[in-house]
Image (cartoon, rainbow, N blue to C red):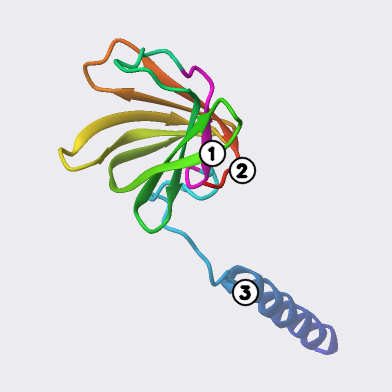
């Protein structure tokens, strides 16, 4: 009988310990259906790597461009002049229409501007490609930081 009581105490202790492990949960549990946009860092600055892909119809000393998605639903535009300075080209509202998380990337569509032009995008931690529906080219960007308008 003594062995039975000892075995019962051991069984109860093991059961209590294992149920404590099973019931432990993190407070920041995330819905698996929701893409982890923050982890893939869409919301940051992106410098265009193929600037000049579309010729401008007017003379300008602009030599570069960048965009920044902010979490408050704004997209900021920057242009760089030949003197190396960055200038703000404005800020518009944007809306994510659809988004899908792939292995180490996200893709989807967003709209912005007064005419709600739709853009397709593909992003990894370091690269972003944006396509205007109907255009014959893509805008390509690399992740950057520290761009400020003067």
Q: CA distance from mark 1 to mark 2?
A: 12 Å
Q: Which residue is mark 1?
A: 86
* Disc 3 + disc 1, Cβ < 8 Å: no
Quadrant in the picture for residue 98: top left
Based on the picture, tell me whether residue 43 belongs to the magenta stretch: yes
Classify mark 3: residues with Cα within 10 Å, few (<14), some (14-19) or many (20+): few
Mark on residue 125?
A: none
Q: Earlier in the sequence, mark 3 or mark 1?
A: 3
Q: Which residues are magenta?
A: 42-51
Above or below — where is 150 with respect to 66? Answer: below
Q: CA distance from mark 3 to mark 2?
A: 47 Å
Q: Secondary structure at mark 1?
A: strand
Q: Position of residue 62 (x, y in %)?
A: 47, 25
Q: Earlier in the sequence, mark 1 or mark 2?
A: 1
Q: Secondary structure at mark 3?
A: helix
Mark on residue 19?
A: 3
Measuring 67% from the left and 76% from the top, which residue is drawn there?
15
Q: Position of residue 16 (x, y in %)?
A: 67, 80
Based on the picture, tell me whether residue 56 belongs to the magenta stretch: no
Q: Position of residue 109 (x, y in %)?
A: 29, 34
Measuring 43% from the left and 52% from the top, which residue is drawn there?
70
């Amino acid at each position: 009988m003594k062995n039975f009581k000892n075995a019962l105490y051991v069984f109860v202790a093991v059961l209590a310990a294992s149920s404590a492990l099973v019931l432990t949960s993190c407070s920041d549990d995330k819905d698996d259906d929701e893409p982890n946009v923050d982890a893939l860092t869409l919301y940051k600055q992106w410098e265009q790597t193929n600037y000049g892909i579309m010729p401008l119809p007017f003379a300008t000393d602009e030599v570069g461009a960048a965009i920044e998605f902010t979490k408050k639903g704004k997209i900021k535009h920057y242009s760089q002049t030949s003197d190396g300075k960055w200038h703000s080209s404005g800020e518009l509202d944007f809306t994510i229409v659809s988004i899908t998380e792939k292995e180490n990337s996200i893709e989807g569509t967003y709209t912005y501007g007064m005419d709600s032009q739709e853009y397709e995008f593909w992003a990894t931690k370091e690269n972003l490609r944006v396509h205007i529906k109907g255009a014959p080219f893509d805008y390509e960007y690399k992740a950057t930081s520290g761009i400020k308008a003067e």
